[in-house]
Image (spheres, rainbow, N blue to C red):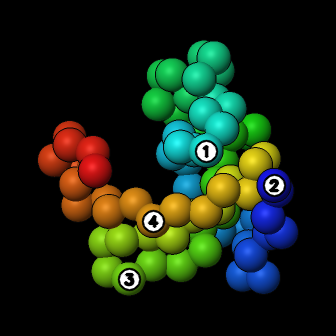
Amino acid sequence: MRLPLDPHADPARRAWVACPGCDDARDCATCLDRRNCRSHWRYLIGNNGLRVHLQCPNCTHTWTLDTSRERRGSRA
């Protein structure tokens, strides 16, 4: 079931991370080079310190990412 976009979803506030819901960027050369792609971005809904709240515009999956763990190279 596809959820509606969060009311705080704003295309001006974006993040470029893989979506755990649809992984739509898995075959994108730009994303694989870890560069900002025009197509595969996520809405940055908000944050609590280093934890960011995201929503995928493709599948509307929402999740929270702890960016302190990302910097250390481990994933939760």
Side of 54 relative to 74 (left or right): right
Q: Which mark is residue 66?
A: none
| Viewer-side label of 1, 2 | 2
Please give left or right for residue 69 compared with residue 56 in the image.
left
Q: Amino acid at mark 2?
A: Met
Q: Where residue 74 sits: x, y (%)? A: 20, 43
In front: 12, or 71?
71
Q: Secondary structure at mark 4?
A: strand
Residue that label 2 marks: 1
In the image, what residue type sits under mark 1? Answer: Gly
Q: Nearer the viewer, mark 3 or mark 1?
A: 1
Label 3 vs label 1: CA separation? 22 Å
Q: Is residue 3 among what the camera can see? A: yes
Q: Nearer the viewer, mark 3 or mark 2?
A: 2
Q: Residue 73 in the image: x percent, y percent?
A: 20, 40
Mark nearer the N terminus (4 vs 1)? 1
**Residue 48 screen position, x and y as percent:** 38, 82
What kind of residue is marked 4? Thr
Q: Secondary structure at mark 2?
A: loop
Q: CA distance from mark 3 to mark 2?
A: 27 Å
- For marks 2 and 4, give the CA distance: 20 Å
The residue to which callout 1 is attached is 21
Looking at the rendered structure, the kind of residue marked 3 is Asn
* Circle 3 SS class: strand
Residue drawn at 52 percent across, 62 percent down: 63
Q: Quadrant of the N terminus?
A: bottom right
Neighbor class of circle 3 (other Cα within 10 Å; few <14, some 14-19, many 20+) is few
Q: CA distance from mark 3 to mark 4?
A: 10 Å
| Label pair 4/1, CB-CB below 8 angstroms | no
Measured along the vertical axis of the image, is residue 54 above or below residue 36?
Answer: below
In the drawing, what numbered circle is on residue 64? 4
